[in-house]
């Protein structure tokens, strides 16, 4: 039995655990330092109700999350959100990423957000597959966008129009 809902502060520990698996895998993010429960709880508070985080629960436990955050402070970009999506290692490939993204899109649409965007390492096939399946377009590739463990990495920019902008 799977369900999705907006995250609360009580989910911070599960969100951190899932995120830290993704950080350790070195396929998803430039981040290398594990997050604590407090780090995540602070992030949830700072993003407030405007920028939602959703969790996917299966059999009573959190197995995935997706979050939106502010893209730029300029008013003209007030409806553009950056997103992240992470699934617990032992739950990947079972539809949780798709459910997390679909729930995040619903929550963002209800807040008047009109675009989700992110960057994905070209080698992150599971992410590129998931995002293509849920309607994201690959805009192009930033070359040498940052270094991970001392090595230059490219990133593929992805975007999806939602809500009013998608009509
Ligand atoms: C990327 C990630 C979020 C995908 O989530 P997931 O729950 O494993 O994906 P799902 O099971 O919902 O699959 C969604 C679609 O993507 C495809 N897909 C997912 N993983 C795949 C893989 N390893 N190879 C091929 N296709 C894959 C599936 O075929 C599926 O399509 P379908 O529903 O039509 O069959 C997950 O692997 C993860 O957390 N990875 C580590 C963190 C990460 O990379 N986050 C993204 C940062 S940009």
Image: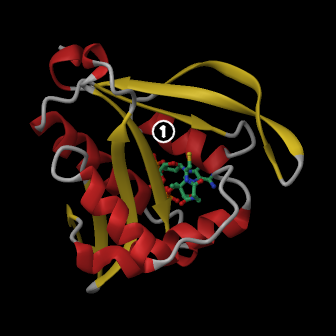
Cβ of disc 1 within 8 Å of ligand 1?
Answer: yes
Q: Position of residue 69 (x, y in %)?
A: 35, 43
Return the residue nearer the eye: 105 or 72. 72
Picture quarter with the C terminus: top left
Q: Quadrant of residue 157?
A: top right
Which residue was labeled with disc 1? 131
**Can you name the residue that lies furthest to the bottom here?**
60
Q: State the image coordinates of residue 158 (x, y, percent, origin top left).
A: 51, 28
Q: Position of residue 97 (x, y in %)?
A: 43, 56
Judged from the image, the secondary structure of the residue bearing numbered disc 1 is helix
Asked which quadrant contains residue 145, the reply is top right
Q: Is residue 67 visible?
A: yes
- Residue 1 visible to the viewer: no
> 66 or 94: nearer the eye?
66
Above or below, 110 relative to 30: above
Q: Is residue 61 above or below residue 121?
A: below
């Amino acid at each position: 039995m799977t369900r999705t809902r907006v995250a609360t502060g009580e989910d911070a520990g599960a969100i951190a655990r899932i995120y830290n698996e993704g950080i350790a895998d070195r396929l998803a993010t430039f981040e290398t330092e594990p997050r604590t429960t407090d780090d995540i709880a602070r992030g949830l508070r700072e993003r407030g109700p405007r920028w939602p985080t959703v969790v996917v629960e299966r059999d009573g436990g959190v197995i995935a999350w997706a979050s939106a955050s502010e893209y730029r402070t300029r008013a003209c970009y007030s409806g553009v959100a950056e997103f992240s999506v992470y699934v617990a290692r032992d739950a990947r490939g079972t539809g949780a990423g798709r459910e997390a993204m679909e729930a995040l899109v619903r929550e963002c649409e209800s807040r008047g957000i009109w675009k989700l965007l992110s960057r994905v390492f070209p080698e992150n096939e599971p992410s590129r597959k998931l995002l293509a399946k849920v309607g994201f377009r690959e805009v192009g590739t930033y070359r040498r966008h940052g270094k991970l463990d001392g090595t230059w990495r490219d990133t593929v920019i992805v975007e999806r129009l939602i809500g009013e902008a998608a009509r």
